[in-house]
Amino acid sequence: MTIPLGPGLRIRGLRLLGYRKDYEIRFTEGDEWNSLSLITGEISTGKTTILEFIDYCLGGSNFPQHPEVVDSVRAAQLSVEASVPVQLGQDDEVGPDAARLGYVRRRFLIQRSIEGSTRDVLIFSGDLDALEQVAPTVVSSDSSATDSLSKFLLQLCGLDGIRLRVAPTRSDSATHQLSFRDSAPLWYLTNTRLDNKNLVFEHTPHKANKLRQVVDVIFDVFDEDRAVLAGQVAELQEQLRGERKGIDALRRFIREQGVPGPIELEDMRGAAQSRRTQALLQLSSVDDQAREQTAFAEEARRAYLEKVEQAREVAGKVRERETLLRRLAPLRAQYADDLKKLTMLKEAKRLFDPLGVTVCPACASQLGDVSVVNGRCTLCRAAVPHLEHEALATSNGTSAGSGEIFDVSKELSSTKRRLNELNDYISSVDSETKDARSESSALDTQSAELRARFDALTREAVTPLLAVREAAVRAVTDAELALDQCSGQYRMLESVEKHEREVESLAARLSEARRRASEAEAARRDRSDMLSKLSTRFHTILQSFGYPKLTEAEINSQLIPWVRGVRYDRVGSSGATTLISLAWELAIFELAYEEKRRHPGFLMIDSPQKNLAPEGLAGTTEEQENSEVAAEAIVRRIYRHLKDWLSGEGVGAQIIIIDNVPPPSVESSVVVKYSGSTSEPPYGLIDDASAP
């Protein structure tokens, strides 16, 4: 399927860039995209997620927040195809149109991240399978930015440069720039809009006003004047002047920098590449020759390398021994300090006896151990409950209060022994360190001697080649610098070519806007004519669906659908609401496409069978069966209408539908069917996620 001449875009495929793997879905067969694409399967397998990601890549504010998506996906890529306007040359076949306006098919890849900053969007030239070797354009997802994704998409649809009124009924109303998101209700019918009784945003007046203006713009309808088209022409003229000034400044800069033309630049690049190749070959030849001429010194080289390795090992041993000595020094100092403390304690007990009385003054008998027992002194029997002092200890080391024995002499001897052992170990380590230092110094001297011997052996063979090698290295460096300079100049020329294409495209869009303004002025189409045609198409579609007891089907001036004299949100039946919503969406889409208006040219519908399959019906089994048969018949008619229109007046349009179980008549249009079971691939969109 190919895109007819004129503005609009088509969806070719979606790729989700993941952490573990990538996930893809294609809406193409070979090189062409499908007019009708169905995504079917069980619930909770990611069908709606596909449409949500497409909407996100087309400027939607939110991406799907399902846990398996957040854990698996880091960015989304959407491949689109569009007919881009160009100015035809003198030799091109042109019709009577004096503007010489033509279109060429172009493919673009829109990439948007779901992590980090989601405001920046990358636009590549090419598709999922083949990207052009051109740097991507970085635009903002904010539609108010100068370079935005919305502006890019509006250009593809011929809607750029249009401003909408904030208060449509006031001639002096302020205006704001049309955003591509403003047209989303006309190309994406979500599951919720099918039956939420807010199809035309009746409950949000500012959205309803904007939607009515967007429909008017798409159908080139302006009741009051042609100010919108005139404003678009003026906006495009201003943009064209700015682009031409920018490209003139860029060309002037390139001339000042002395950048040659493409042919001369290609010759320079080829010469630099040739010089680099020759220099690399010469460098490789010099290295090979040096290795051959120094092969006789292989024994000296091996001896030198072995000696260097030995010197490295001994140097490591020296560092290890020196580190050990530094760690042992504080330990030895601690032992010496403990020895001093113990010696002082022993001397204190010998010089300062805590009790000088050794003979009883009453009987002249030798006094025994003096202690405090049950709060009384054993010498004088006085009550001393507060006295618990080491001074009452006797020379044998027994504490008067605790009964513990502390032998200072024994502890002093043990400390002296440990200190002596530590001194002996430190002495041995110090001796090993000195020996290792001597050995390391000797090995370093021997390594230097072997290096000098090796240099002496190879100097005569290598020296003549050094100058040649240095020259080859310089030649490689110079050639690479020349290549880098050529690449930079190429990028300058590519930038000029890119801006020239943008100027040509902008001039073509200006011609298109002027043509539309001229046609609108000549046709003087009013809004009532558009509403009449929309109502007729709306009635025809409902009739093809088999809507029961169909009468008085119309779309009023507020774009609100009515059936049988009742507004659609008051019909009572949720199934009827679904059919009316489908017919309303298709009426605008079909009529705009057939009249070659500025609708994007594709339509996405989520769950068109919603509320049509009866569940939990009351009554007899026969009544339930009859209701189910009637619902199945309506579903078959819906798909028959779509297929008939896409193969007739709608050739070249694109419709993508999410449906659990479509009728067998459209089985050939199914692009993917998710089983919901890991044993029957594909399980779902994120096919490596764990099944619940």
Image (cartoon, helix red, strand yellow):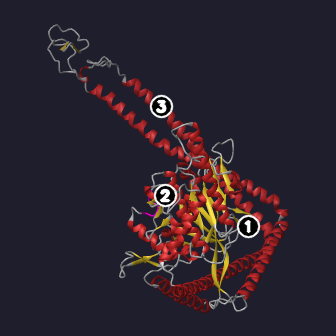
Q: Nearer the viewer, residue 359 or 575?
A: 575
Q: Badge 1 local density, few (<14 within 10 Å), some, or many (20+)?
A: few
Q: Which mark is in front, 1 or 2?
A: 2
Label 1 vs 2, first from the N-terminus: 1
Q: Which mark is residue 418?
A: 3
Label 2 vs 3, first from the N-terminus: 2
Q: Going 44% across and 57% down the picture, which residue do you hit?
A: 569
Q: From where the camera sits, is residue 147 visible? A: no
Q: Badge 3 local density, few (<14 within 10 Å), some, or many (20+)?
A: few
Q: Position of residue 303 (x, y in %)?
A: 77, 56
What residue does disc 2 label? Answer: 193
Q: Quadrant of the C terminus?
A: top right
What residue does disc 1 label? Answer: 31
Per the image, label 1 sits on a secondary structure element best described as loop
Q: Tell me the kind of residue under disc 3.
A: Arg
Q: Position of residue 485 (x, y in %)?
A: 66, 82
Q: In the picture, residue 260 is in which quadrant?
A: bottom right
Image: magenta residue range: 197-201
In this rendering, the answer to whether 297 lies above or below 362 is: below
Label 1 vs 3, first from the N-terminus: 1
Q: Badge 2 local density, few (<14 within 10 Å), some, or many (20+)?
A: some
Instruction: Report the Cα–Cα distance between label 2 and label 3.
Output: 90 Å
Q: Tell me the kind of residue under disc 1.
A: Asp
User: Is there a contact, CB below 8 Å, between mark 2 and mark 3?
Assistant: no
